[in-house]
Image (spheres, grey):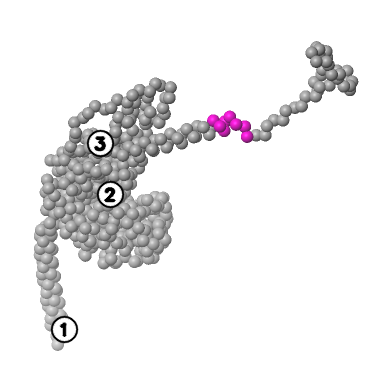
């Protein structure tokens, strides 16, 4: 057979097979695109739970299967869609990894890359190209994780902090539980797919609150470009660029962004955790199971919805129903309980978040002595139409007087003037406060008494008095004659020795 004829047949056959493969590939891609679009449309129909709340602003329609918008400082949930559905977080897992690293490690620590750290990740997954035995500082590692989403670097950090990756994963689950997560379980520090590695938008919003409360992590997670210079233990120039399109200069740049972390796997689809701040309101947004670039579009829509439809109201400036019980008991010109200054005050920094169309007076408040924070003696919790919208701490005023001038004449206590009943009045159990103040006063008096007692009483051995012996001046050892009663004593000169 002619060689040229055989060659032509082979070429034509190969061309035909290639064309067929390309056709099938295009058909498969087109079919996958249609499926993704159909899935996205179906996800739009998932109910938005917060839209069912009376007088609550309707939230935007999103293509995320699950999403949440939470005000960071109060924990108020402004938008809820499947927020308790378990989903795969993908690389947003690294928010928890770096949070633990920031809290437990020194940024100057030297992190070494082991064989397991480098080669236990999936081939082709996101990495910085680190080799076994190379080292970076902990700070460089965290930038590598948050800017470039480097999986082998997350492994190396986990080994450095936990001793082994498994030990660090145990730390991740412990930290999540400590924060309040009840529907999450983590299997690795990087977020590559594992069926037992999952979380929910609500749980991850709680983790994000802690993460974005750290100034250093906010800076790292908002960095578009980071360079790691070569060293003796790491010979390559690492030029790292973020793929996050919310950053400045990118197609979906958001002016009020505090920080953000992307994630993607085939099973998780696209995920995104972000934080933005405007006019004193700090919002956390988590979207899960999206198709790019919808995760950026939906995140911006949710941020804009939150900033446009809700307001922060300072509790101390608006609360008028807060009053201690038996006010007259605290009034006396003798100032026995420090009436010149209020004994209890509301924390001036606490606020609630409610819709723009609502008024502070429409909230419902309840007092709790159990859930206190810092030095507070009680907490006032606020709800609006059944939604928790924030709380305020009731504090014991530090300047309250605990002394009493017993020399001042007693003056009868004048009862307070009768006031018109208010729609809601919060009564503080002042008995507890009184006993607290009296207890402190008693301890103070005891301390003063002990100090005075110690100061005035000598615990050293008493000085022995020197005996005085009288010796006659003429050194004659003779008995003195007893003088008759009533007679005057003869005057002698005596020496003291």
The mark closer to the camera, 3 or 1, is 3
How many angstroms separate mark 2 from mark 1 (CA)? 72 Å
- Left-right relation of 420 to 138: left
Badge 3: how crowded within 10 Å, few (<14), some, or many (20+)? Answer: some
Q: Is residue 455 magenta?
A: yes
Task: Identify the mark at residue 209; answer none if there is no mark.
Answer: 2
- Left-right relation of 470 to 59: right
How many angstroms separate mark 3 from mark 1 (CA)? 100 Å
- Left-right relation of 58 to 69: left
| Magenta highlight: main SS | helix
Task: Identify the mark nearer the N-term, 3 or 2.
Answer: 2
Badge 1: how crowded within 10 Å, few (<14), some, or many (20+)? Answer: few
The mark closer to the camera, 2 or 1, is 2
**Dot 3 corresponds to which residue?**
322
Boundaries of the magenta span: 452-459
In the rendered image, which quarter is residue 83 located in? bottom left
Task: Identify the mark at residue 3; answer none if there is no mark.
Answer: 1
How far from the left and from the top, in percent, is residue 496?
A: 80, 20
**Residue at x-position 33% and y-position 41%:** 377
Between residues 129 and 360, which one lies in front from this camera angle?
A: 360
**Residue at x-position 28% and y-position 63%:** 197
Q: Quadrant of the C terminus?
A: top right
**Residue at x-position 34% and y-position 66%:** 120
**Residue at x-position 21% and y-position 60%:** 85
| Labels 3 & 1 near each other (Cβ < 8 A) | no
How far from the left and from the top, in percent, is residue 259?
A: 26, 48
Task: Identify the mark nearer the N-term, 2 or 1.
Answer: 1
């Amino acid at each position: 057979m002619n060689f040229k004829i055989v060659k032509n047949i082979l070429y034509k056959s190969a061309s035909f097979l290639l064309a067929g493969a390309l056709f099938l590939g295009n058909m498969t891609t087109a079919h996958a695109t249609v499926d993704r679009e159909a899935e996205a449309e179906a996800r739009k129909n998932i109910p938005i739970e917060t839209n069912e709340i009376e007088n609550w602003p309707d939230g935007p329609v999103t293509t995320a299967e699950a999403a949440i918008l939470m005000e960071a400082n109060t924990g108020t949930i402004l938008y809820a869609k499947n927020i308790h559905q378990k989903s795969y977080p993908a690389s947003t897992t690294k928010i928890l990894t770096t949070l633990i690293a920031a809290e437990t490690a020194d940024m100057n620590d030297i992190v070494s890359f082991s064989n397991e750290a480098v080669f236990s990740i999936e081939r082709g997954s996101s990495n910085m190209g680190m080799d076994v035995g190379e080292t970076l500082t902990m700070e460089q590692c965290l930038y590598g994780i948050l800017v470039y989403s480097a999986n082998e670097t997350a492994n190396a950090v986990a080994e450095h902090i936990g001793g082994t990756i498994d030990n660090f994963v145990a730390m991740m689950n412990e930290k999540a539980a400590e924060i309040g997560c009840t529907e999450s379980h983590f299997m690795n520090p990087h977020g590559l797919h594992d069926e037992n590695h999952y979380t929910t938008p609500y749980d991850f919003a709680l983790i994000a609150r802690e993460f974005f409360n750290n100034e250093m992590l906010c800076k790292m997670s908002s960095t578009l470009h980071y360079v790691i210079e070569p060293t003796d233990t790491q010979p390559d120039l690492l030029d790292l660029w973020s793929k996050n399109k919310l950053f400045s200069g990118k197609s979906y740049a958001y002016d009020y962004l505090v920080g953000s972390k992307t994630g993607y796997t085939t099973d998780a689809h696209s995920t995104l955790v972000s934080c933005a701040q405007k006019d004193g309101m700090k919002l956390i947004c988590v979207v899960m199971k999206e198709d790019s670039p919808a995760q950026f579009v939906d995140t911006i829509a949710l941020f804009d919805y939150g900033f446009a439809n809700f307001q922060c109201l300072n509790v101390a400036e608006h609360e008028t129903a807060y009053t201690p019980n038996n006010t007259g008991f605290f009034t006396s010109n003798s100032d026995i309980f420090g009436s010149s200054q209020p004994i209890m005050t509301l924390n001036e920094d606490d606020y609630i978040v409610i819709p723009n169309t609502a008024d502070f007076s429409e909230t419902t408040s309840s007092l709790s002595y159990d859930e206190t924070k810092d030095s507070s003696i009680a907490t006032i919790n606020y709800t609006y139409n059944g939604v928790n919208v924030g709380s305020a701490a009731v504090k014991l005023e530090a300047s309250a007087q605990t002394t009493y001038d017993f020399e001042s004449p007693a003056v009868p206590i004048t009862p307070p003037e009768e006031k018109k009943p208010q729609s809601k009045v919060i009564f503080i159990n002042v008995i507890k406060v009184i006993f607290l103040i009296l207890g402190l006063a008693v301890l103070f008096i005891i301390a003063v008494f002990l100090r005075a007692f110690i100061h005035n009483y000598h615990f050293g051995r008493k000085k022995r008095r020197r005996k005085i012996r009288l010796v006659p001046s003429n050194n004659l050892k003779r008995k003195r004659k007893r003088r008759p009663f009533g007679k005057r004593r003869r005057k002698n000169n005596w020496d003291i020795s």
